[in-house]
């Protein structure tokens, strides 16, 4: 996928990244990066744009980047000098690294240790934070009719998405059928105090393995928001591989992000964000492989044990509320898997802003999302408003 940058550089040579204003100074920037063994399309990337020319008096945005959670992370802070912004940005990136190391599903971590114990039929002590995370993930899984289910870690592994290298072949049908017959779910996880008073996790199903890939980026967004505020940062944009949280504004203008077109280079649309809002996307273009011309993405339906084929992309915008980041990450998954049935499930999840691109490329938007999205080059040829 081609890339394009519109960077601005101050006199000292330090790179600035400017978020998209209401008026486009240059074309929306989207980026895609191939890293060893992993195709990562940065579906939602802060546009490197701004109403700025040489000598402009607007305050610069301070930018920090990293690679964590298997994807690119970008942090923009507005209204502060580099010296003021640096400690806050560093604290956020440290927290991201800690979460990545604690909750990695297949590299040595607290979570992988839990999965090893579950496979052996053993109880495993877990930290208070992990106990809270697992309980919350289970609550959200139930709210989403279990279409988002962090308990499908073994299925993810069967399909080859539990590794840095993308798979090159389909899993054995008998193995998928055996997993489907067992139907492990995070609902099968029990958490209770042990004899020493510490929380312990166990399950009667050895097929159960926890993968928090559809939860952790959103959880990290909420942690980032709390850390930034504790450091006195009131205006920032945090992007974790397409999961975005907005704080405040960009020098008085709403933050604006771009939605990657799932089948073409460049942007499908842009969305303006208010203080405390978060955006999450799921797409079959983010992590997938092809066999005999057919695409198999990492978005698996727990009911069938197969990758979803009826949807190319789905985006949710979560209005300001507690844990908006977490909900933005989680909610896009069950709605993506639900396909044409997403409206009723969205209502039950209290998600009003939804955009879906189906397998043919037709676009559906909720009435609320219609008011927030701006399509690049005009509305798509097939556009439905769902009320």
Image (cartoon, rainbow, N blue to C red):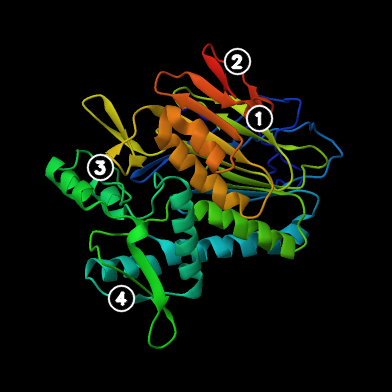
What residue is pinned by disc 3?
167
Front disc: 2 or 4: 4
Q: Residue at x 15, y 40 (%)?
A: 173
Q: Quadrant of residue 307?
A: top left
| Marks 3 and 4 close (CB-CB < 8 Å) | no
What residue is pinned by disc 2?
379
Query: What is the spatial separation of the Cα atoms under label 3 and label 2, in whole angstroms?
Result: 36 Å
Is any part of residue 282 visible from this angle?
Answer: yes
Compared across the picture, whether 38 is left or right of 329 comes to: left
How many numbered discs, if any?
Answer: 4
Height in image: 376 above or below 8?
above
Q: Residue at x 27, y 26 (%)?
A: 294
Element type at marker 4? loop
What residue is pinned by disc 4?
123
Q: Quadrant of residue 377?
A: top right
Compared across the picture, whether 87 is left or right of 190 comes to: right
Query: Mark 3: few, some, or many residues within 10 Å (few <14, many ≥20)?
Result: some
Query: Which residue is at the front of the view, 292 or 371?
Result: 371
Query: Mark 2: few, some, or many residues within 10 Å (few <14, many ≥20)?
Result: few
The first of marks 2 and 4 along the sequence is 4
Query: Mark 1: few, some, or many residues within 10 Å (few <14, many ≥20)?
Result: some
Query: What is the spatial separation of the Cα atoms under label 2 and label 1, in whole angstroms?
Result: 16 Å
Compared across the picture, whether 232 is left or right of 219 comes to: right
Query: Which residue is at the front of the view, 368 or 101?
Result: 368
């Amino acid at each position: 996928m081609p890339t394009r940058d519109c960077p601005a550089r101050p006199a000292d040579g330090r790179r600035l990244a400017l978020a998209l204003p209401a008026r486009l100074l240059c074309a929306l920037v989207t980026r895609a990066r191939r890293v060893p063994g992993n195709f990562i399309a940065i579906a939602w990337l802060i546009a490197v744009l701004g109403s700025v020319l040489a000598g402009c008096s607007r305050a610069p945005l301070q930018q920090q980047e990293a690679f964590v959670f298997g994807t690119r992370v970008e942090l923009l802070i507005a209204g502060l000098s580099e010296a003021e912004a640096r400690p806050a940005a560093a604290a956020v990136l440290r927290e991201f690294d800690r979460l990545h190391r604690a909750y990695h599903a297949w590299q040595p971590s607290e979570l992988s240790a839990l999965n090893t114990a579950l496979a052996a039929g053993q109880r495993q002590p877990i930290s208070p934070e992990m106990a809270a995370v697992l309980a919350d993930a289970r609550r959200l899984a139930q709210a989403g009719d279990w279409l988002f289910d962090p308990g499908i870690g073994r299925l993810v592994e069967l399909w080859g998405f539990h590794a840095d290298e993308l798979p090159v072949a389909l899993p054995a049908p008998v193995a998928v059928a055996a997993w489907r017959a067992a139907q492990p779910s995070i609902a099968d996880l029990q958490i209770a105090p042990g004899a020493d008073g510490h929380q312990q996790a166990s399950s009667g199903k050895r097929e159960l393995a926890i993968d928090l890939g559809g939860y952790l980026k959103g959880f990290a967004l909420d942690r980032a928001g709390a850390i930034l505020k504790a450091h006195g940062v009131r205006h920032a944009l945090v992007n974790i591989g397409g999961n975005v949280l907005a704080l405040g504004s960009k020098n008085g203008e709403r933050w604006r992000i771009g939605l990657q077109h799932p089948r073409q280079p460049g942007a499908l649309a842009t969305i303006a964000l208010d203080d405390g809002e978060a955006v999450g996307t799921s797409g079959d273009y983010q992590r997938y492989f092809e066999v005999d011309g057919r695409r198999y993405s990492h978005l698996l339906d727990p009911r069938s044990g197969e990758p979803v084929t009826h949807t190319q992309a789905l985006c949710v915008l979560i209005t300001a509320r507690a844990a908006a980041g977490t909900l933005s990450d989680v909610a896009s998954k069950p709605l993506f898997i639900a396909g044409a049935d997403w409206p009723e499930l969205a209502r039950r999840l209290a998600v009003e802003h939804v955009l879906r691109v189906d397998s043919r490329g037709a676009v559906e938007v909720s009435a609320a999302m219609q008011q927030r999205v701006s399509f690049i080059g005009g509305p798509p040829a097939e556009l439905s408003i769902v009320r």
